[in-house]
Amino acid sequence: MPKFEPVIGLEIHIQLKTESKMFCSSPNQTENVPPNTNICEVCTGQPGSLPVPNQEAIEKAILAGLALNCKIPEYSKFDRKNYFYPDLPKGYQISQFDNPLCGAGEVALKIDGGERKIRITRAHLEEDAGKLLHPAGASYSLVDLNRAGVPLLEIVTEPDFTSPAEARIFLQQLRTLARYLNVSDADMEKGHLRCDANISMRPEGDKKLPNYKVEIKNMNSFKAVEEALAFEIKRQTEALSHKEPLKVETRGWSDAKRVTVSQRVKEGSDDYRYFPEPDLPVLHLTRELVDSLKRRMPELPQAKAGRFLKEFSLPEKIIWQLVEDRGLSEYFEGIVSELLEWCSVEGITDQKIITDHIKEAANWCVGIFTELTNAHGLAASQTKITAENFAELMKMIIKSEVSKTAAKQVFTEMFETGEDPSNIVEARGLKQLSDNSSIEAAVDKVIAGNPKVVEDYKSGKKQAMGFLVGKIMGETKGQANPQVVNEMLLKKLS
């Protein structure tokens, strides 16, 4: 039986985060507002109304294009894409056809510890359509035009993906990129990031593109994209193995049934009868504009990840947990700055010790700190814990002034109150005992009071050690330094 491999390309719509819509002054706000609230004569297609391009949307689209290494042409124009649908008031959509805002580009896809290039065909601006509502049990549909005219950046890739996992990872990296640039919230579940996938199968090792492709729509999560593509690979492979013809069509993904279903024959560009938008002038994208946008470009995720690896020697998994959220990565760098300053004051110059301190802070950032921010729906910058106080707690752990167990209790209270960690430790009596005489007294008392457990340990039952350590920690109200306890207990038992 012949083997087949998938050929996958993506068409991605990113809803741009602007104050107003693409061609009018209506607010770009579609969530938590009554239907048909943020509309005007332009986005509802009233006779005689004229569109005006949104400069903020154009600049954000170019910024995204630059991050995707797209060529930015000197001139670009808008076109009319003609089709009829109940939520498209004008009977056409203002989009871009042969002169997109962003031309060919290329980005690196990080996967399985390696990297390969994904080619970008184009990225262009267009306006969104409205939304149809289908009340349960009703024989009619309703139209909400709040979304009509919302600015969208459509990114089209070449068919460079070879697996559903690659497509998912690319979309996740694109979401991170959009958030770094602040061009979109890129929330797939809220429709800010939407993806249509084109997939076909060809004989394994063949380099020619197949003579058909299937488009999959209605995928509203990264998991859905991966599952829909996996389903299509299986469906198409079975059909080809039995020499059944596969047609060019559009299929929808059913989340409930976990299958794709045929919707219609896929349209071609001729079906849309594109022609230049007569109500909008050609855009002249000057070098001054493009250069000014390049200067606005932040450090991008992959560059930051590379720097974190070089400067902090962190594990790659932790690096990407930090880098995925721009706010968290910047917050972490504030903590590192405080720790480095403290190391300098303390005369700590051993790079391994410094790196270990930074790793400890990173673990707390992606651990308990992220758990708390997620649970409360807060960004890192919105919390009450300052980078200075975060670093202070790390110093207290490093200096054995507080145990890690007690530090978690302190951290939770810091998150709730914003209080200085040293004040919380003092007020709650959580300062760790490192005084040998006090610990030794507790060790002696526990050994004397548990002769049977001591004998068990000496006869080879090593788990008895844990029991004795627990008793000592209880005797000192959890304040004894566990390392000192273990060392002292071992010495006395041997």
Image: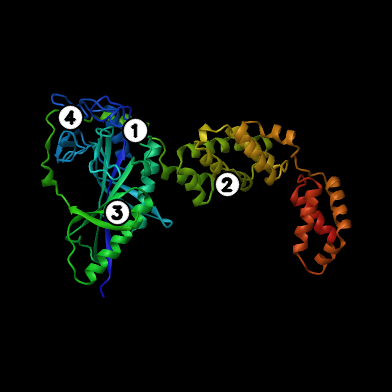
Spatial distance from mark 2 to mark 4, Cα to Cα? 54 Å
Circle 3 sits in a helix, a strand or a loop, which is it? strand
| 71 or 190, nearer to the observer | 190
Closer to the camera: disc 2 or disc 4? 4
Whether the residues at callouts 3 and 1 have beta carbons within 8 Å, the answer is: no
The residue depicted at 72 percent of the width and 43 percent of the height is 400
Q: Badge 2 local density, few (<14 within 10 Å), some, or many (20+)?
A: some
Whether the residues at callouts 2 and 4 have beta carbons within 8 Å, the answer is: no
Dividing the picture into quadrants, the one containing residue 32 is top left
User: Which amino acid type is shown beneath numbered disc 3?
Assistant: Trp
Q: Is residue 361 visible?
A: yes
Give the mark nearer the N terminus: 2 vs 1.
Answer: 1
Where is residue 159? Give x, y as percent.
Answer: 25, 54
Is residue 139 positioned above or below 426 on the image? below
Spatial distance from mark 3 to mark 4, Cα to Cα? 31 Å
Circle 2 sits in a helix, a strand or a loop, which is it? helix
**Residue indicated by mark 3:** 253
User: Which amino acid type is shown beneath numbered disc 1?
Assistant: Lys
Where is residue 449? Give x, y as percent.
Answer: 88, 56
**Residue indicated by mark 2:** 363
Which mark is on residue 45? Answer: 4
Which mark is on residue 17? Answer: 1
Closer to the camera: disc 2 or disc 1? 1
Spatial distance from mark 2 to mark 1, Cα to Cα? 32 Å
Give the mark nearer the N terminus: 2 vs 4.
Answer: 4
Give the mark nearer the N terminus: 4 vs 1.
Answer: 1
